[in-house]
Amino acid sequence: MKLVILDRDGVINHDSSEFIKAPEEWTPIPGSLEAIARLCREDYRVVVATNQSGVARGYFDLATMNRIHARMIHRVRQKGGAIDAIFFCPHGPDDNCDCRKPLPGMFHGISTRLKTGLGGVPAVGDSLRDLDAAEQAGALPVLVLSGKNELDLTSGDSIPERQHIPVFEDLAEFTEALLDGYLDDQMRKSAEQ
């Protein structure tokens, strides 16, 4: 099974420090929907893994989050793509759950539900917590710079031990590289670990 795991905010859609609290606040990053459609045409299953602590914080409820996700799914379908599943953590940072990234619980859930290992599976995120969760679950962490980017890659101090992690401008650039075979060696090494 060819699989790609995507974070939502900052990877598929523009992120906000105020949270995405309503469907009309959800706006795709240019090229992201087309990238998902392209992955689907190449027989990749696309799964979303997203922290949504706005639920625990009372900024929106599960019904609203589902409407936001329905908008995302609809917009992806309009471009000819599909999202196979959305895994989310509704908990806050102090809830001590195991599904909130940087913990790997959400990734383990994906592996269990899809009945597949995650070795060699690209997991695209825009934050250290995304990278940490992917690494702990055995997936291949991939960083995109289209999110809020608390990482300062210019200093070299933010991720010195992570020089092996591929970095792309956005989901469209990642997809291009993936489909061109640029990540084949890294995916193979990740699968062998």
Image (cartoon, rainbow, N blue to C red):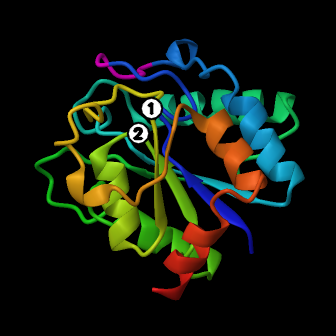
Q: Disc 2 residue type?
A: Asp
**Quadrant position of the N terminus in the picture:** bottom right
Q: Residue furthest bottom?
A: 192
Q: Which residue is mark 1?
A: 145
Q: Nearer the viewer, residue 95 or 40?
A: 40
Residue 67 position, x and y percent, is 58, 29
Q: Which residues are magenta?
A: 17-21
Q: Are marks 2 and 1 in contact (CB under 8 Å)?
A: yes
Q: Nearer the viewer, residue 45 or 173?
A: 173
Residue located at (88% from left, 37% from top): 80
Residue located at (26% from left, 48% from top): 91
Q: Which residue is mark 2?
A: 126
Looking at the image, residue 165 lies above or below residue 65: below
Q: Disc 1 residue type?
A: Leu
Instruction: Give the Cα separation between the discs numbered 2 and 1.
Output: 6 Å
Residue 133 position, x and y percent, is 34, 61
> Does residue 112 appear in the picture of this structure?
no
